[in-house]
């Protein structure tokens, strides 16, 4: 698909932000938060079914990273994909409709929460098999190099992914062939009920990059400005030199693994959760902005009201969207070959 | 006898076999501290300790291979896959190692191990998490494949699987874990390779396995009201398949429908049809029909998912058709 190229935003200064950028980061993160709070409600009401993994607490990771992309760049991620989809510009209507299993959903109601896709924004999907999408990201990097463009792909994953064989194979090839991929590990410290320390022999997992001689860094994932700085540097390296990077973004999930799992319990304590919740990424950014006099209580309230209305509109739209036509069950299994 | 869930029946089987034989250990994702993703291994870590109830990283290929290695040198691993969808990552170890080690080594290395976990669709989990793999696995010489449908069979067959000196694939069902039934408190075995007539009838044989057995019994109940008596044959084991029990039923009813969760092409039902036509050719009064998932990946939307899955109504329609009755 031909894509217009927009000029890179802020890259040479590695993620330095100006006031309008900070405002738009805040808008995006708050939208994700309010959107997912309503997802939890919709799940309880049975409007959303199956597995539904919320991003609440981790918004700074996806938002900071994706805010640096051009329209023609790519994003690929896991089943925990609502926040990144919204950050990438999928409409709240299209995402909510997908979660409701309706025909106006971004995957026409066939994918659901774990499989948001959108060709228009080069959003290459939420993927459900842990580790499975990492080689796919490497493949996209390969195609970019093959075609000789200066696009990049961001590949998001949870920290459990680093223990899979697919991760190792994919990163080795990316480093070996110098592919423009930025691998972003969202280290929220747990894979379901398993703490990182119980699953990985090394605990500073960005150091896995050493095995592939890949540039690597550890980043504070609760501060969207820090995320931006680190990802901007990685994107610059990918775009200008076709060198991959491995980033470990340290974050925390404020909710259960999925809507069917307990928030705390056998694997983490309530105190630990409360401790981490003090560094809510939205509060951290708001504090940065307050310091600079860019937002006050009234401004925050107004923004919140505006966003809540957008989310309500998405809900209403999704509810009114028709169920997929039954004939569509048999569509999309394969395409007609035209050559 | 106590009335317990399928989940607890499996838990009892694991517990009793681990008490009985200290070479038996359980390994998989979230089996220990978290007490099992579906709580099948509840309490086992506390009773047997972390050498025998082992949490793994998300490394299906890796820990399936660890199980193979341990079995080669004398342990009796039970490898749990959180679901069989994820076992696809481990299929190399299941197929290329466990299933053929004995043969490749000219009989020197038996593989006394179990691969188990939930198989098939639950609700609205979409394409990557809603798959039934029995026909794939049953294709492989060197494996036994079992699909217990009731708590009674779950306990007795898992115990048989753990005691078997061959690799046994145990396909459970997420939707079965909460179902209840009578289960003996102590030790008993339900042999692998034996089907069971779960409901007697003389008008049509309905062959099912795993979760679809419950659906088949509902079908039998519904048709009973119209005076149609359906004989429900629960395969229980897909490989080796109990051809004799199936054939005996078809010789009695002269008609058959095969119901399964998986896809049509090269499915379990195709194998059943092949056996029946070879063994009961002269007894058949109608072509055998099959009921299965529509030939598409599983969609997320409720209405599409409902249409994609086999159900009671589709099965009743098939039975009416083989009986040359007008379909309602
Ligand atoms: C291959 C595979 N094994 C197991 C699962 C089940 N599962 C889904 S998410 C998950 C934990 C993943 O944790 P992590 O990578 O840290 O991501 P997070 O959920 O924390 O975002 C597991 C075990 C799966 N989807 N795929
Ligand atoms: Mg995690």
Image: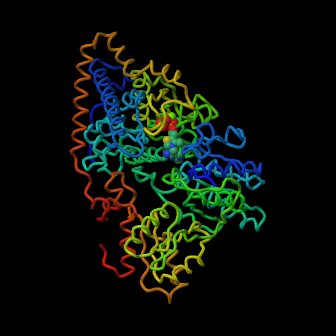
Using the rendered image of the protein, determine whether residue B293 is visible from the camera's viewpoint: yes
Residue lying at 36% horizontally and 26% vertically, measured from the top left: A11
Left or right of residue A290: residue A132 = right
The quarter holding residue A22 reads top left
Near-viewer residue (B208 or A125): B208
Near-viewer residue (A271 or B42): B42
Left or right of residue B61: residue A25 = left
The quarter holding residue B73 reads bottom right
Residue lying at 71% horizontally and 43% vertically, measured from the top left: B52
Give above or below for A73 relative to B169. Answer: above
- Quadrant of the rendering where the C terminus of chain A is positioned: bottom left
In the rendered image, residue B235, in percent from the top left (x then y), is placed at 56, 69
Near-viewer residue (B210 or A78): B210
Using the rendered image of the protein, determine whether residue A170 is visible from the camera's viewpoint: no
Residue lying at 77% horizontally and 51% vertically, measured from the top left: B21
In the rendered image, residue A68, in percent from the top left (x then y), is placed at 35, 30
In the rendered image, residue B326, in percent from the top left (x then y), is placed at 30, 78
Give above or below for B78 relative to B279. Answer: above
Near-viewer residue (A2 or B163): B163
How many marks are shown on the rendered structure? 0
């Amino acid at each position: 698909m031909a894509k217009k190229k927009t000029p890179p935003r802020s890259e040479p200064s590695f993620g330095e932000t100006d006031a309008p950028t900070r405002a738009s980061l805040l808008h995006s993160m708050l939208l994700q938060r309010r959107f997912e709070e309503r997802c939890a409600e919709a799940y309880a009401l049975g409007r959303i079914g199956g597995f539904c993994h919320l991003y609440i607490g981790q918004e700074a990771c996806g938002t900071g990273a994706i805010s640096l992309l051009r329209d023609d760049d790519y994003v690929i991620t896991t089943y925990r994909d609502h926040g990144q989809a919204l950050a990438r510009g999928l409409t709240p209507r299209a995402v909510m409709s997908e979660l409701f299993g309706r025909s106006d959903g971004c995957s026409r109601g066939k994918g659901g929460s774990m499989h948001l896709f959108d060709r228009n924004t080069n959003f290459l999907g939420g993927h459900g098999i842990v580790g499975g999408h990492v080689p796919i990201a490497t493949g996209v990097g390969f195609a970019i190099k093959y075609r000789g463009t200066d696009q990049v792909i961001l590949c998001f994953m949870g920290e459990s992914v680093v223990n899979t064989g697919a991760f190792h194979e994919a990163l080795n090839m990316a480093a070996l062939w110098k592919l423009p991929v930025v691998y972003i590990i969202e280290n929220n410290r747990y894979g379901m009920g398993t703490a990182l320390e119980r699953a990985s022999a090394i605990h500073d997992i960005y150091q896995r990059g050493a095995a592939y001689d890949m540039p690597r860094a550890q980043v504070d994932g609760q501060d969207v400005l820090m995320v931006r700085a680190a990802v901007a540097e990685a994107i610059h390296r990918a775009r200008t030199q076709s060198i991959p990077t491995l980033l470990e973004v340290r974050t925390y999930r404020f909710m259960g693994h999925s809507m069917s799992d307990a928030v705390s319990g056998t694997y983490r304590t309530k105190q630990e959760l409360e401790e981490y919740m003090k560094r809510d990424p939205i509060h951290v950014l708001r504090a940065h902005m307050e310091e600079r006099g860019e937002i006050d209580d009234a401004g925050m309230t107004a923004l919140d009201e505006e966003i809540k209305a957008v989310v309500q509109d998405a809900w209403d739209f999704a509810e009114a969207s028709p169920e997929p036509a039954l004939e569509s069950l048999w569509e999309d299994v394969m395409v007609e070959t035209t050559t | 006898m106590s009335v317990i869930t399928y989940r607890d029946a499996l838990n009892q089987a694991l517990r009793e076999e681990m008490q009985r034989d200290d070479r038996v250990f359980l390994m998989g994702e979230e089996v220990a501290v978290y007490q099992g993703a579906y709580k099948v291994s509840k309490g086992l870590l506390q009773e047997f300790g972390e050498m025998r109830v082992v949490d793994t990283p998300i490394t299906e290929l890796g820990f399936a291979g660890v199980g193979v290695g341990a079995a080669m040198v004398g342990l009796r691993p039970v490898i749990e896959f959180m679901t069989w969808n994820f076992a696809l990552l481990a299929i190399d170890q299941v197929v290329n190692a466990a299933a053929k080690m004995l043969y490749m080594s000219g009989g020197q290395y038996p593989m006394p191990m179990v691969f188990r976990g939930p198989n098939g669709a639950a609700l609205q989990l979409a394409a990557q998490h809603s798959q039934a793999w029995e026909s794939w696995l049953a294709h492989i010489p060197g494996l036994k494949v079992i699909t217990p449908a009731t708590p009674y069979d779950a306990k007795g067959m898992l115990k048989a699987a753990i005691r078997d000196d061959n690799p046994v694939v145990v396909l459970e069902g997420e939707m079965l874990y909460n179902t209840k039934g009578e289960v003996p408190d102590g030790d008993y075995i339900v042999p692998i390779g034996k089907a069971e007539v779960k409901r007697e009838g003389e008008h049509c044989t309905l062959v099912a396995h795993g979760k679809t057995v419950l659906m088949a019994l509902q079908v039998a109940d519904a048709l009973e009201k119209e005076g149609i008596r359906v004989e429900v044959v629960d395969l229980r084991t897909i490989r080796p398949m109990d051809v004799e029990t199936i054939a005996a039923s078809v010789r009695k009813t002269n008609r058959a429908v095969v119901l399964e969760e998986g896809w049509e092409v090269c499915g379990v039902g195709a194998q059943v049809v092949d056996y029946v036509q070879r063994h009961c050719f002269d007894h058949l009064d109608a072509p055998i029909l099959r009921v299965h998932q529509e030939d598409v990946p599983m969609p997320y939307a409720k209405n599409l998912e409902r249409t994609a899955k086999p159900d009671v109504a589709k099965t009743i329609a098939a039975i009416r058709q083989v009986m040359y009755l007008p379909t309602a």
